[in-house]
Image (cartoon, rainbow, N blue to C red):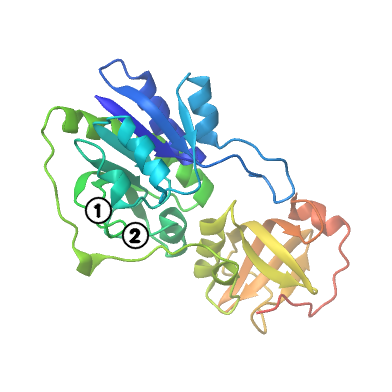
Amino acid sequence: MRIIFMGTPEFAVPSLKAIALEDNDFELVLVVTGSDKPRRSKHAAAEPSPVKQAAISLGLPVYETDDVTSQEFADIVAAQRADVIVVAAFRILPSAVFEQAAFGAFNLHASLLPAYRGAAPINWAIIKGERETGVTTFFLQQRVDTGNIILQEKMLIDRAENATDLACRMSVIGARVVLDTLYLIASRKVVLSPQDDALASKAPKLTRDNTRILWSQPVNIVNDFIRGLALKPTAWTTFNGKTMKIFKASLVDPFFETMPSSSGMVFVDKGRLYASCSDGWIEVLSLQLEGRKPMETIEFLRGFRYEAGLQFFV
C-alpha cells in the first residue's frame, strides 16, 4: 500500500516511524512537512522540522511546503499514486489534495472527536479541566475535523501532567492507532462512525490574548490554565510592568495562613512565591521574566526584593 505521510511537529514523529519501521507492505512514497524555519525562538537559525529530521534519518523522500493550496502541490501529490494519505499535525488540506488517495486520506487528531475540534485540542482539554481525552483517526472531508471516525482510543489525564507531557504520551498512543487504521483500510474492514455535531466543542488557535492568566478565577482553573499551556506557548501575566511567563505552579494547602485581600496579589514566604486567585493562593514554581532566562522560582527570588502589596496585573 502506497502511503504519503504529512506532518510537521514532534507529535507526528512516532506515527511516521511506526509506519516506516513496520514489517509489512506499507510503502512510504513521500513525506510532506513544513519548510525549514526558526523553531526554538524568532531569532534562531532556521532548522528542519522534527518530521523532516526523522524522515531523513529513515532515508525517506521529503517534500517541504508552506502552501498546500497550490496547483504544484496537488500535482506532486497526484504523481505519487498514493493509496492512502496519513495526516498528523499538519495544515488544513484542500479537497484537490486529499481526494488524490485511492482509499482516502485520514487524520490523527488529539482528542475524542467531536470534542475539541481545532488547532489546540491537547491544550484546551487540560485548560478546561478534563480528566479524560484520547486520539481519533477520521477520514478528511471539506469541513475541518468533522469527518467520519475510524478509530478512537481513550486515555486519562493525570492531574500533575502538563500539555507537553500529555502530547508526548498521546503521540505514542496515536502511532499505534495510525497503524491499526492502516491495517483496517488495507483489509477493507473499516466501520465508520459519523460525528454528532451537537456534541462538538472547539479548540481554537492559541494567541497572546487567550493565553493571559486571569487571576480573578478560582485556583483550580488558574492551575489548569497554566498546565494546559506549558511548556509552549506558556501562560503569561504582567509583573512590575514586564511580561512574565509561568511554566509551572501548584495548588496550595487550603489552610495556608495568609488569606489574599484581592486577586493578583504576590506573597513571598520562606523562599516561596505565591499568587492569589479568587478563592486562595497558588504557588509559582518556575517562570521567566521578560529579558531573562527561564528559571526555577527559588533562583528568581535570590535577586528579588519583595514589597508587600506587589501585584500581578489582573
Instruction: Determine the residue located farthest toward the top in the rendered image.
Output: 23
Percent of width and height locating residue 99: 25, 44
Element at badge 2? Answer: loop
Q: Cβ–Cβ below 8 Å for labels 2 and 1?
A: no
Q: Quadrant of residue 73?
A: top left
Q: Is residue 173 visible?
A: no
Percent of width and height locating residue 39: 63, 44
Percent of width and height locating residue 251: 57, 62
**Residue 4 shown left or right of residue 283 in the figure:** left
Q: What residue does disc 2 label?
A: 117
In this view, the residue in front, 144 or 299, is 144
Amino acid on which disc 2 is placed:
Arg
Between marks 2 and 1, how big is the CA–CA gap?
14 Å
Q: Nearer the viewer, mark 2 or mark 1?
A: 1
In this view, the residue in front, 149 or 124, is 149
Amino acid on which disc 1 is placed:
Gln
Q: Residues within 10 Å of mark 1 (few under 14, many from 20)?
A: some
**Residue 255 shown left or right of residue 26 in the figure:** right
In what quadrant of the picture does the N terminus appear? Answer: top left
Vertical order, 282 against 217 (above or below): above
Vertical order, 3 against 89 (above or below): above
Q: Is residue 63 visible?
A: yes
Percent of width and height locating residue 209: 58, 72
Vertical order, 202 against 18 (above or below): below
First in sequence, mark 2 or 1: give its number.
2
Where residue 65 is drawn, which disc sits there? Answer: none
Task: Count the marks.
Answer: 2
User: Which residue is located at x 37 percent, y 56 percent?
Assistant: 131
Q: What residue does disc 1 label?
A: 141
User: Which residue is located at x 44 percent, y 49 percent?
Assistant: 158
In this view, the residue in front, 106 or 29, is 29
In what quadrant of the picture does the C terminus appear? Answer: bottom right
